[in-house]
Image (cartoon, grey):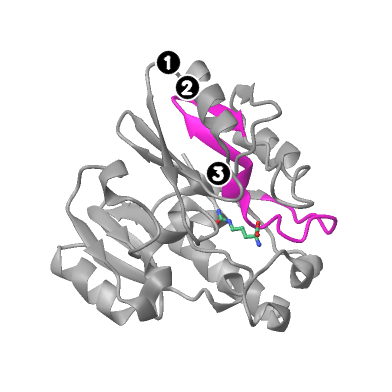
Amino acid sequence: MKAIVRSVPDSFVDCITNAADGHTIDVALARRQHAAYVTALEQLGLDIVRVSADEQHPDCVFTEDCAIVVDGAAIACTMANSPGRAGEQGPVLEALGLPVRPLAAPAAIDGGDVLQWRDRIHIGQSTRTNGAAVEQLQALLPDKDIVPVPVDGPLHLKTCTTIAGDLILHTGHVDLGLLPDLPSYQVPAAEAHGANCITIGDTVLLPDDCPHTAARLAQQGLEVVPVPMSEFRKADGSLTCLSIIY
Ligand code: CIR
């Protein structure tokens, strides 16, 4: 398994953000946190593919938004509703080294809105991702069930729900009935960001300040690896955003 990651540019301080503390990003600390994240993935046996930072794109560290990998091909995300981010995709697609299938206007989609589960692909309908993207994906992937999921509030679908054995979610933003048919665990409000985690085998990468969520995952027999995320959260980013794993 591989992970595509991209270095943190100096311009990260100018990222798009709605976070109240967005202007306090410490780039040096973000780089240390990014290194810890990459090490955690490496220790799980992933091959790390590194893309260099692009100062013209302050949010380029969030590679997840650039592309979706389905059945050995990359689908290039348009990022049309992410101001200034379209243009990040090129080097990421090149690093993926897979055949590329494009989407076209009027499709708008960020990879953070894509939750794959078996043959279903859930597509968040957030401010970043629209119905045209759902239609084009269904046409490109006739064997998959493409399920639109309205997202109320969070930046992306995966900001508030991912899969770690069970469905793990921060409640109130999506209709549970549209999500994978799995038992669900609702993270406490103070650990909303714990709803975005990365599961590799029996190990889960989780933000390092989610004790209740960590205990619940451990109870299920999962090994929890805590990862510091404060500086990326100030940029409205979460764990999955920092890589494409395939
Ligand atoms: C943005 O607003 O586009 C970035 N500051 C954060 C992107 C986070 N990506 C993700 O959730 N997949």
Q: Residues within 10 Å of mark 2 (few under 14, many from 20)?
A: some
- What element does badge 2 sit on? helix
The residue wearing badge 2 is 138
Q: In the image, is 189 to the left or to the right of 63?
A: left
The answer to whether mark 3 is within 8 Å of ligand 1 is yes
Which quarter of the rendered picture does the N terminus lie within? top left
Q: Earlier in the sequence, mark 2 or mark 3?
A: 3
Residue 232 can be seen, yes or no: yes
Q: Which residue is mark 3?
A: 111
Across and down, in percent, residue 106 comes to 69, 30
What residue is shown with label 1? 142
Find the magenta span and give its range.
51-76
Q: Is residue 13 left or right of residue 166?
A: right
In front of the other: 61 or 106? 106
User: Which residue is at a point 46% across and 52% down the rendered structure image?
Assistant: 151
Instruction: Give left or right: position of 231 versus 176.
Output: right
Mark 1 vs mark 3, CA separation in Å? 19 Å
Query: Label 1 sits on what residue type?
Result: Pro
> Which residue reaches farthest right?
56
Determine the residue positioned at 69% across, 46% down. Answer: 81
